[in-house]
Amino acid sequence: MAEKASHGRGVKYLDATKIEFGKRIYQELQRRGWRQAELARRIDEPRDKIGRYVNGISLPTDTVLQKIAAAFEVQPEVLLDPSLTPPTPIGPSVYDDLIPSGTIRITTDAGQHGLATVMINKTVSFKTALKIAELLDADEADQPTSD
């Protein structure tokens, strides 16, 4: 793992240079189709401050970093550590032909008492997606195995 370094205001960065951080912010803005003003509005900070980050002039305080990460729905480390892959842009699902976007479909199989098939094609926050995955993993652990 990359060594942590402080930029002087108590914020811990993982080998993030001002330029690298600016590139990450720019990438996230592009993925969402946002302008700097939109991010500034969402985090309640001046637009010129966002411009300084994007242009690699400065790094944010820990508080501002947390707000930026929350606006992008990512962990702060994703914005700081160049070895981490930015999230894939959210776009039309390959399953839109099977189940319309925004839909949750639950079906049961008469031969499988107490079991159901769940199809979800809905954009949710990463945090919610993790909770769903945890529930599904826990449910799999409760299923009988066929040996």
Image: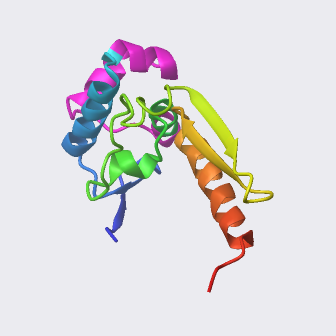
User: Observer-nearest residue: 128 or 107?
Assistant: 107
For the rendered model, the colour scheme is: rainbow
- Whether residue 115 appears in magenta in the rendering, the answer is no
User: Observer-nearest residue: 70 or 65?
Assistant: 70
Residue 108 in sight from this viewpoint? yes
Direction bottom: furthest residue: 147
Q: Is residue 141 left or right of residue 50?
A: right
Q: Please give the name of the residue rendered at 35% of the width and 25% of the height, measured from the top-left corner.
A: 32
* Count of all numbered marks drawn on residues in the image: 0
Where is residue 39? Give x, y as percent.
Answer: 41, 20
Direction right: furthest residue: 114
> Vertical placement of 143 versus 19: above or below?
below
Where is residue 24? Give x, y as percent.
Answer: 27, 39
Q: Please give the name of the residue rendered at 59% of the width and 55% of the height, measured from the top-left corner.
A: 133
Q: Is residue 119 left or right of residue 106?
A: left
User: Observer-nearest residue: 146 or 123?
Assistant: 146
Q: Is residue 97 left or right of residue 122?
A: left
Direction front: furthest residue: 111
Where is residue 64? Give x, y as percent.
Answer: 48, 33
Q: Which quarter of the rendered picture does the N terminus lie within? A: bottom left
Where is residue 118? Give x, y as percent.
Answer: 63, 45
Location of residue 113 by image quarter: bottom right
Secondary structure mostly seen in magenta is: helix
Residue 46 in sight from this viewpoint? no
> Vertical placement of 71 versus 65: above or below?
above
Q: Which residues are magenta?
A: 37-65
Q: Which quarter of the rendered picture does the C terminus lie within? A: bottom right
User: Observer-nearest residue: 86 or 39?
Assistant: 86
